[in-house]
Image: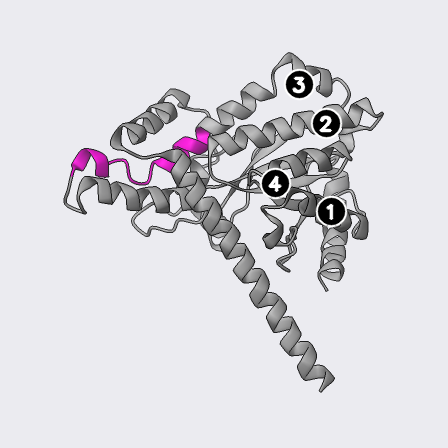
Amino acid sequence: MVVADIAAALAVLRPVFDAADGTDGFVSVETDGFVSVEVAPELARDTKATIDAARGLHQRVDQPNLFVKIPATAQGAPAVEAMIAEGRSINITLIFSLTRDAEVIEAHLSGLEAFTAGGGDPARVHSVASFFVSRVDTEIDRRLEKLAGGENGDAAILSLRGKAAVAQAQVAYQHFHAAFTTDRWKALDALGARVQRPLWASTSTKNPAYPDLLYVDSLIGPATVNTMPEPTLRAFEDHGTLVRTVDADPDGARDTLDKLADAGIDMNDVEQTLEDEGVHSFSKSFDELMQSLTDKANALSA
């Protein structure tokens, strides 16, 4: 069922892919059964199993505008490199930290170097690094309130609420720009290689006290992708501001992260917490989907 759905979606978007010379028009495949498909979530901590599953999905759905999602766990990063080294396009998902972001950029570069060394055409290989934005603020805001001593506590600490996610994403964009302007990248670029685009996911505003376009208006820039849910997309059409913002104040973004560290926020611990929750959430959704399909199949066969 997933393969049939993906094949249909790929056909719908193929004209966009062709018109954009392979820049846009992708369908991202995740095996939780939704229109974007990834390797089964229980494989997120198993590098070899992830490689086998991602390769299998690419072989079953052999289309140039297919992304297979791989979670950005410590075990997922080597799988990303292996798949790109085989010339397969990958969406690296569930990124919550700058550390993981650096790992997946390296996986992209190393994979491309291996692919081109074997005579592969790097122009056919694409990847995006999917930062989950709003979830970072949700977790850090909770920690800030605890550190401040409650809602009426330390005002300086509380003033940092709602700022961590955008600051981290903006610093990640600086890392992206630095990685794809080096001599190492220029050698790949000369062969036709594509950059690994930053993708902003989870960009609906979870806290009603924050602007509804907080994670859209502040992250606009070249080579980025924003996977807005439809209500956020409609809101942007209505009152969004189309201005380059993602690198408007890089020093301010770094200063915000420094202030969070000074306040007692451990970004590595935040990343691990959110990664564990993300893998668990994906696994739960996958299990529920498989159970519903099993129940339906049993009912029909009866």
Look at mark 3 in the image and give the residue it sits on. Answer: 185
The quarter of the picture where residue 292 lies is: bottom right
Look at mark 4 in the image and give the residue it sits on. Answer: 76
Task: Please identify, in this view, whether the residue under mark 4 or under mark 3 is nearer the observer.
Answer: 4
Q: Which residue in the rendered view is the most extreme toward the top?
A: 183
Q: Nearer the viewer, residue 201 or 225?
A: 201
Q: Secondary structure at mark 2?
A: helix
Is most of the magenta stretch helix, strand or loop?
Answer: helix
Q: Is residue 82 above or below residue 93?
A: above
Task: Please identify, in this view, whether the residue under mark 4 or under mark 2 is nearer the observer.
Answer: 4
Q: Secondary structure at mark 3?
A: helix
Label 2 sits on what residue type?
Leu
Nearest to N terminus: mark 3 or mark 1:
1
Q: Residue at x 44, y 49 (%)?
A: 204
Q: Residue at x 50, y 56 (%)?
A: 281
Q: As drawn, is 287 to the left or to the right of 115? A: left
Label 4 sits on what residue type?
Gly
Look at mark 1 in the image and give the residue it sits on. Answer: 52
Residue 112 image label = 2
